[in-house]
Amino acid sequence: MSMIPLPTFDLAHTFLVAFLALAIERVIGYPQWLHKRFGHPVEWYGSLLSRFDQRLNTPDQSPGWNRLKGVFTMLALIALVLLISVPFAGILQSLEYSALFEALFAVPLLAQKELKRFVRRVADALDSSTLEARQALSHIVGRDTSTLERSDISRAAIESLAENTSDGIVAPAFWLAVFGLPGIAVYKVINTADSMIGYKSEKYLTFGWAAARLDDLVNLIGARLTGLLFAGAASLTNPVATSRALATIWHDAKKHTSPNAGWPEAAVAGVLDIRLGGPRNYNGQLVDLPWMGDGRKELNADDIRKALRLYNQALVLFMIIIFFFWLFVY
């Protein structure tokens, strides 16, 4: 009986996989017919995590014990993902055109096309109806959108685009480029867990602690790289915007409540010469958050479209960088 081959983590191979995955996903995304038939890996992760949450999360008991159960949950999820993805990557690497096959299986774990589609939908809706724009925005942000006005909707869409460029594309592609399919699979299970239980609410303050801390850790490089990509992409047409983006990152990124999200958001604010962040309502309460950027406060659908153009430029630059890294290590 032959043993299942283990993958080799060769950078020449994994960088090629990352480049191919980004190129394929940019064009076709994750096809709807595949989603309808097999679901989505993030949904699989979410379903599994929900079972751990229901059985282990006991916020009314000892905080230390509940935190420990949250740590166990994350370790169990990561171990399970590695147990499946490592031998699976080994099998794929034993095939001819292995990089292409690995890239195809990595495509569902990236979100270039989907993110662009959802954000563009907000901009298009904003042209005709604030109500429709609020509904479109509700698909990409977690907070209540029912009272947001045009400028607030535009700002929230741009912030979501900036942050999700890191969480949904750059960071997962980075881990794919470094550790192949197991790298991106582990990243996505951590990121999914953070989006589900990584809150500072009474229910998840202790149980979700490990998920939130791990997500901060695995996004540390991706978020900073995303900010630099936005700044670098602007340099192709407007060097002044690049300088402004770098200055905004330096002065304002640390103001964000997240240790990572401030980098891409501050970069976009600097490039577009607008203000992001600022006071907002959460659960009916006004939260006085600091501003990022020194530009305009009043935003509109055209600003969302400018952000989308910057998004496209940044991701093309990202693919070029990965391609040249592949040439260097090949």
Image (cartoon, grey):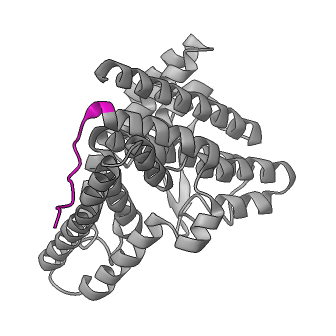
Q: Residue at x 40, y 34 (%)?
A: 16
Report whether 157 appears left or right of 15: right
* Magenta segment boundaries in residue numbering: 1-12
Residue 252 in the image: state x and y as whole percent.
42, 33
Residue 23 in the image: state x and y as whole percent.
54, 37
Q: Residue at x 54, y 29 (%)?
A: 314
In-front residue for pair 279/230: 230
Q: Is residue 268 visible?
A: yes
For residue 237, which quarter of the picture? top right
Residue 300 in the image: state x and y as whole percent.
74, 41
Q: Is residue 298 visible?
A: no
Residue 19 in the image: state x and y as whole percent.
45, 35
Q: Residue at x 39, y 32 (%)?
A: 225
Judge whether residue 41 is colored magenta: no
Q: Residue at x 78, y 63 (%)?
A: 131
In the rendered image, which quarter contains the N terminus?
Answer: bottom left
Report whether 58 appears left or right of 303: left
Against 35, is 181 above or below? Answer: above
In-front residue for pair 127/3: 3
Against 207, is 327 above or below? Answer: above
In the rendered image, which quarter contains the C terminus?
Answer: top left
For residue 306, which quarter of the picture? top right
Outermost right residue: 128
